Image (cartoon, rainbow, N blue to C red):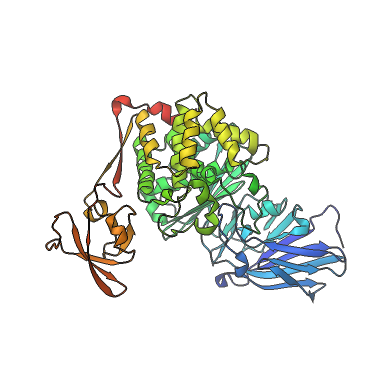
Amino acid sequence: MLKINQIAMHYHIARQSPASQFIQVQLTLDCRAGETIHLQLAAWRPGRYELANYAQKIRSFKVHHKELPLKWQKKSKDLWYFSAQETGTYQVTYEYYCNQMDAGGCWSDDIQLYLNFSNFIFDVKERSNEAISLSIALPENYQVATALPNKGHGRWEASGYQHLMDSPLLAAVELQHFDYQVAGHQFHLWFHGEIHFDIAQLIKDFKAFTKKQIEAFGTLPAEHYHFIFQLLPYKHYHGVEHAYSTVITYGPASALAQKSELDELVGVSSHELYHFWNVCRIRPKELIPYDLSNEVYLDTGLILEGVTTYMGDHFLLESGYFSLEDYLKILQKQIQKEVDHQGWENQNILESSFDLWLDGYKPGIPDKKVNIYNRGALIALCLDLMLKSGESSLSQVMKKMWESFGSTGQGYVLDDFYSMLCQSTENSQPIKAFWEDYVLGKGELILPLTKLLANIGVRLTFHDEGDTILHAYGIRKDENGKVLQVHPEADAYSKVMINDLLSYDSGMSKSDKADDLEIVLERQGRKLETIIYKGNKSLYPKVKLEILQKKFFAIDWIKNY
Ligand SMILES: [Zn+2]
């Protein structure tokens, strides 16, 4: 029977065997006679613009009505459907394999059940906006971290598919909970795993960057926000943003006793909180709402991840967590990455953003693309420095983005961001020229970066550091002599292959010039001898950032306005 004023869609989750890593899912829904129900599983999840094809982790799919099995079919790899013969309650049951421990996956074992609903719940196409109730059979001693509204022991409720799929849940025997308040909002810190740092100090640091971020946007439309941490015993680093929470996986947990490692944890936390506004609410039009059934092509990776990476770190500088020296070290690493790859010669950041679906999350072929996080952060830095020279700032532009496209739920296109940048300064000419060359174009970003940093008294220089094979001949190899990378401008580019095994004897030289390098290569079991000529330019140089005390305008830079 159809129940009026009652939630007609319910998920129940149980585990017959935690160690098998399978969960048993039962979706109960009320259908009308003759109605065809389409069950769409996500092919990807918010925050990662890459196909995950979660359907491969589903087994034993069945539909029942009055305890009798019903015929169902698939329309595509992740779209199931069935027809209801008569009005009444139907059960869809299946098993999902929870074996992916990262910030966006699902995991089950003897001490926890960790769920990202985006992986395994269906968007019931005929019921997308209907409320969903949820129950999970959990051991009595489990605690639960989630932003989902709680409706009693083991019961929660979501306003619809988009809400449930965007609200991860971690249930575990040992979960540590802390909280803090900023401007009337409550922030929850949930830790699963060992804590090897001073929690009181961490809360102070979180409070400080949270306060600065809320001030920058002027508002945070949420009563509660949850940081859910999986502190793992092995090396790991991942964070995923959600509307009212974030999951951060980090390891090894014991390494967080060191400040440099804790910096990474605090860094990703600030980044994910910034996503509360930028991405979760200030969203490209294409992502409103999330259509997880197919690729959604985006040219806005610069804003989604570049601006967030830059601002996340910048708020740690502004809140006093990072000293200027700490911050310059991060910036130096980012610039080093930019210098170590030539992908920018072949693809601009818009093209690399569009291609995220293709190769955005793997190394890919040599020098084909740019990293939207790293190059995006450096472009954001350049824009911020240009804006600040004219009494504006990137933070102010993002506040306007929030007011026009975020708080309104309207969504933006790339040109909206560009227009806001231009409008926010009296002299928009430098911004326009920069956009043309380094966002739409494939310019060498180091050039404007050097200039803009010099304007605030930070000197960017390059130098060679011992490794002659790298700097003089453009060959990067590992400790066994295996070639990892060859610079496209090097003579070696036409002679040395990636994965060649390189050996050389500096004592013998067939060449007349002392600078020429005679090498022996092992390639696919063959031995080759060749001479590599030295170029007149230092390749893959080391980056150095220094503060020129007399000229330094730290306040102008640190302050977000
Ligand atoms: Zn991000």
Confirm whether residue 149 shows in the render: yes
Confirm whether residue 456 shows in the render: no
- Nearer to the camera, 377 or 514: 514
Compared to residue 179, the image places residue 454 above or below, namely above
- Residue that appears at 35% across and 49% down: 258
* Residue positioned most to the front: 512
- Nearer to the camera, 192 or 432: 432
Q: Residue 163, percent across and down?
A: 68, 51
Q: Residue 339, percent across and down?
A: 35, 47
* Residue positioned most to the left: 507
Q: Left of 385 or right of it: where is 258? A: left
Compared to residue 228, the image places residue 495 above or below, namely below
Instruction: Determine the image quadrant of residue 375.
Output: top left
- Residue that appears at 84% across and 52% down: 5
- Residue that appears at 58% across and 33% down: 419
Q: Left of 303 or right of it: where is 120? A: right
Q: Residue 422, percent across and down?
A: 54, 30
- Nearer to the camera, 151 or 522: 522
Compared to residue 387, the image places residue 58 above or below, namely below
Which image quarter holds the N terminus? bottom right
Instruction: Determine the image quadrant of residue 334.
Output: top left
Instruction: Determine the image quadrant of residue 320.
Output: top left
Q: Left of 302 or right of it: where is 337? A: left
- Nearer to the camera, 345 or 390: 345
Q: Residue 478, percent across and down?
A: 29, 61
